[in-house]
Amino acid sequence: MSVGVIAGPATEPGPPACRLARLASPTTALVVGLVAAALLAAFAPILVVAHEFTLSNFGTPFLIETPYVAVGFLVARRQPQTPIGWLLLTVGGATALSGDSGYYAWAVYGLHRALPLGPLALVLGNSMAQFALLALPLVILVFPDGRLPSRRWRWVVGVYAGLRAVAVAGQVAFAASALIGHHVNAHTVNPGGGSIVVNQPSGTSWLSHLDAPALVACVLLILASVGVQVARYRRSTGVRRQQMKSLMGGAMVCVLALLALGSGTANGNSSSLVEEIWSQIPWIAFSALPISISVAVLKYRLYEVDRLVSRTLSYALLTALLVGTFIGLVALTTNTLALSGRVGVAASTLVAAALFNPLRLRIQRLVDRRFNRARYDAEATVAAFTARLRDAVEIDSIRGDLLDAVNRAVQPTHASVWIKP
């Protein structure tokens, strides 16, 4: 008797291919993610060099940028052809580069530090925030499948991108004119501000105002995107409705943050500690958008990144445990047991190597239960079927158990069993 199982995979249509999709790949996502992480890591040393390291200067930008980079990397790595991951990476990476460049330019021109690439830092610090503002409303608009609501929205996005391009050109020209005219010093550089170059001659000041139409368009596009998502939410059902509900929460927080900043109630000009903290809250609130997307991705399995998340957490926990064990054993063998340093290090290394595989298996199972339920449940289903198969004798019972195990493990669109006498 021979038994065959035919199962069709349960696939869902992905986002439509576009011209830029050819350049998108997991490798590209890894490179971009590493560059963005390096920009985040460089922020603290640059603040120290610029003598501007404070809790608000470091903490607020870091809390805003890190969720965008982390969630953007996860989505771009797992689904490189959907634009949402790349847009999130653009917001986080461009904001981080703008902050790094601004404070670096202040160290060069404000504190007169002998550092290279000062002009480049001035230009980047004055223009890179425009790219973050370009991508922010688009994240809301194309969620969750990466598609625009209709073809007519291409004109809206095209006009908005054009206005943002004009704003970028204006900021670059404004910084270049200051460099060419030698009007860059401690009085004309603003560390950490949205516009790094300030107090320029009146003949070129109009260049700095070219971003005003783009800023108004950004606010309007965010409001319109929220309206589109409200309409989608009303038409959605099931898991998709929960995903939309998660995004709507983060988007509404961003809208409230925009209103607070636009009203001037969070200007931070008071010396009161409470008002100073309140002035930072609307900025930190912009991190609610990637956090809400991460809830949709992880809890409701939007892009099936459970495996990537589980591997990342597993090896991070494993590394921390092995490093802690190694350091503890070195201290124990060299201080308590009075062994020589070389012997203690060698013994600790052997113990850590012996613990690697058992710890890896235990941590992987523990993390899979929470972040990779599909694989964990599939393995548990197959193990349970194998245990029942040892005692099964009736063909019909085996056939039913086999189909049940296949359906629960891989969730195919159809499954059938062929039995040859």
Image (cartoon, rainbow, N blue to C red):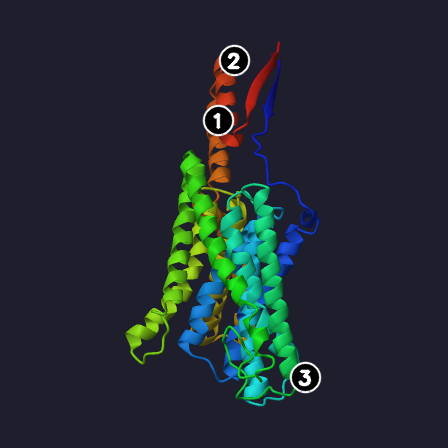
**Mark 3–mark 2 CB contact (< 8 Å):** no
Q: Nearer the viewer, residue 308 or 69?
A: 69
Q: From the viewer's perspective, is 131 left or right of 62?
A: right
Q: Cα distance, mark 3 to mark 2? A: 86 Å
Horizontal and vertical percent position of residue 52: 47, 82
Q: Is residue 126 visible?
A: yes
Q: Which residue is labeled 1 in the image?
A: 385
The label shown at residue 395 is 2
In percent of the image, x 41 and y 57: which residue is there?
Answer: 254
Q: Identify the mark nearer the N-term, 3 or 2.
A: 3
Horizontal and vertical percent position of residue 213: 53, 63
Q: Is residue 380 above or below residue 181?
A: above
Q: Which residue is labeled 3 in the image?
A: 180
Horizontal and vertical percent position of residue 50: 52, 83
The secondary structure type at the circle numbered 2 is: helix
Q: Identify the mark nearer the N-term, 3 or 1.
A: 3
Q: Identify the mark nearer the N-term, 2 or 1.
A: 1
Q: Classify residue 253 by image quadrant.
A: bottom left
